[in-house]
Image: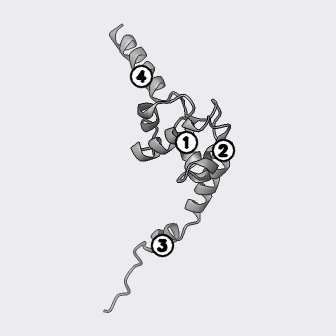
Amino acid sequence: MLKTLFGAVLALFAAAAFAAVDVNKADMAALDSVKGIGPALATKLLDERKKGNFKDWNDLIDRVSGVGSGNAARFSAAGLTVNDASYAGAASTAAKTASKTAASPKATTAAQKIAKPQASTR
């Protein structure tokens, strides 16, 4: 019984941690809770929102310096929304990032670092 209650409370906290934060409704603390958004960017978002709500993700990207499609995808994946909508480019940007990581020179370099047997000098 206690385990079930503990599990339910834990699930509730997990759901709250991943709750969407809408940029047009959020305060400083809510924006700062999104992974990747610190106090400086949260301030930029709030200052720009004072001029008018963001219409969509492209409007946010155009109006806020420091937010491009890559950051928009990361913020969306972390729970940020604009008018309750996730960033449409998030899936394609994530796929591009994954393919770049797989084909990166670092991956090849790591494979090349596998120790080669030393030739015997006897």
Secondary structure found at label 2 = helix
Q: Which mark is residue 59?
A: 2
Could you say whether the residue bearing mark 3 is in a helix, strand or loop?
Answer: helix
Q: Pointer 3: what residue?
A: 109
Label 1 crowd (10 A; few <14 / some 14-19 / many >=20): some
Q: Nearer the viewer, mark 1 or mark 3?
A: 1
The numbered mark, 4 or 1, whose residue comes first in the sequence reads 4
> Residue 46, relative to residue 106: is it above or below?
above
| Marks 1 and 2 close (CB-CB < 8 Å) | no
Pinpoint residue 6: horizontal percent, then vertical percent: 36, 15
Which residue occupies 59% across, 62% down?
Answer: 100
Q: Earlier in the sequence, mark 1 or mark 3?
A: 1
The answer to whether 37 is drawn above or below residue 107 in the figure is: above
Residue 56 on image: x %, y % = 67, 39
Tag on residue 48?
1
Q: How is the image coloured?
A: one colour
Q: Among all residues in the image, which is located at the extreme left?
A: 122
Residue 119, by quadrant, is bottom left
The amino acid type of the residue labelled 4 equals Phe
Residue underneath mark 4:
13
For the residues bearing labels 2 and 3, Cβ distance under 8 angstroms? no
Residue appearing at x 49%, y 69% in the figure: 106
Q: Earlier in the sequence, mark 4 or mark 2?
A: 4
Secondary structure of the residue carrying tag 4 is: helix
